Structures are given as C-alpha cells and as structure tokens.
Amino acid sequence: MALSRFLLVRHGQTSWNKNNKYQGQTNIPLNDIGKEQAYHISKRLAKEKLNAVYSSDLDRAIETAHIIAKPHNLEVIPTEDMREINFGSWEGYNFEQIMRIWPEQYQKWINDPWNYNPPGGESLGELTRRVKNFMLKTAARHPGQNVLVVSHAGPIRAFLSVILELKKQFFWKFKISNASLTIVNYDGEEDDSFIVTVNDTSHLDI
C-alpha cells in the first residue's frame, strides 16, 4: 500500500493551556492567541495539497481544523479516536493541585502511566490503542494521499511512538507545541513508515 502523508497539527492555545491546567477531554475553546496561531498555520499549509481533513471532535481542535481547511474547501471529519487522553477528575487542575489533592494516585500514574488510569480517566495504553486504530483505518482509506489531522499533544506523541515502536518510557520525550506541525509518512506498517518533521513552529515566528 502506498504511503499516506499525515500532517499532524496540535490545536491552537486555550486559556487552560496558558494556565497549565490539565485539559484532557474537557471542551475548552481556543483563546485569541490560539485563533491567531491557527490562522498562521493555515497560511503555512494553504499551498499544500490536502485530500482529507480529520480532527479530534473537541472544540479547540475542530475550530483549528476549520480555519486550516477553509482555503482547501474541504469538510472537517470529526473523530473521537484522536481526542486528547481523558484525565478524569484531574481535568481543570494544575500539576501542583493534583499532587496535593491526589498524591497517591498521581504517583501511581507517574510510575506506570501505560497501565494506570487517573480517577475516571484512561491510561496511555488505552490512548495509544485508539490512536493506532485511527492510523490503520485512515491509512487504508487514503493510500498515497495527504491527510491533515488536527489533534492534541497526547495523541500526536502516541502516533510517533507507534511509528518508532518506542519503549514506553520515551513517550514524553517529544515536545508538541500549540499549532505545531508534525509530518509522518505511514501505510499501516511501521517498518516502511518514516517521520519527516516533528513540532515545526516556524510559521509562528513572526
């Protein structure tokens, strides 16, 4: 099967990003900076040939995707598979607050995030399995095509981890900034796939 080219974009900034709150699947919209970031990456990708646009179904991703898709006259296809990881009860709190309120649970998460679920949330293992499911389905649907996917830091890290067949402890080693661009060529087989660029934010340096 021909390699599909995935252009992975993290959504623009939100007020919770700015205040370092765990956002997860809470539906927080873009702030004014996030909207501006989305327009900058839209200009960056305006001349790219895009065959399809997918997005996490959360508002901050959908809004970013619509801004990017508009010059291409493409429909945005929402998908739950590319939602951010569900942090459950921790959403809306920052690191210091979580450590104070849930010290034992947070330590378990730090020790084994692949298998441990935050209260009411999901593990990194569950996140990675649903992201891989999206990767396989979408590569099969768009062989040899350019596919834009607007998502979140967690799913983009999961995408890269699948491609590289990384050990679990390396999951957090990728910096994925708001409105960044990561490009991966993928056909459903990790051996044939490769990473073109990670966390490119040159379009934001204005």
Image (spheres, rainbow, N blue to C red):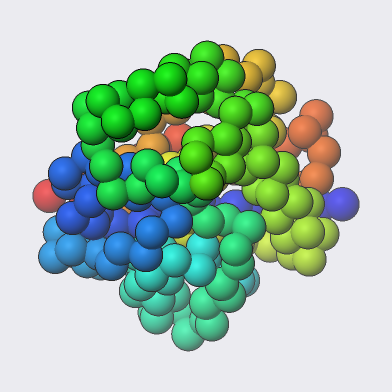
195 lies above or below 19 = above
For the point 29% across and 57% down, which residue is it? Answer: 12
Residue 61 horizontal side relative to residue 165, left or right: left
Asked whether residue 3 appears in the rendered view, the answer is: no
Q: Position of residue 144 (x, y in %)?
A: 74, 58
**Which residue occupies the foreground of this view, 43 or 117?**
117
Q: Position of residue 162 (x, y in %)?
A: 68, 33
**Which residue occupies the foreground of this view, 175 or 116?**
116
**Which residue occupies the foreground of this view, 78 or 123?**
123
Residue 162 horizontal side relative to residue 157, left or right: right
86 lies above or below 107 = below
Residue 59 occupies which quadrant of the picture?
bottom left
Picture mark count: 0
For the point 40% across and 80% down, which residue is it? Answer: 70
Residue 101 horizontal side relative to residue 5, left or right: left
87 lies above or below 83 = above
Q: Position of residue 95 (x, y in %)?
A: 27, 30
For the point 25% across and 64% down, which residue is it? Answer: 30
Which residue occupies the extreme right position in the image? 1
For the point 75% across and 51% down, which residue is it? Answer: 133
Asked whether residue 26 appears in the rendered view, the answer is: yes
202 lies above or below 144 = above
Q: Position of residue 39 (x, y in %)?
A: 25, 67
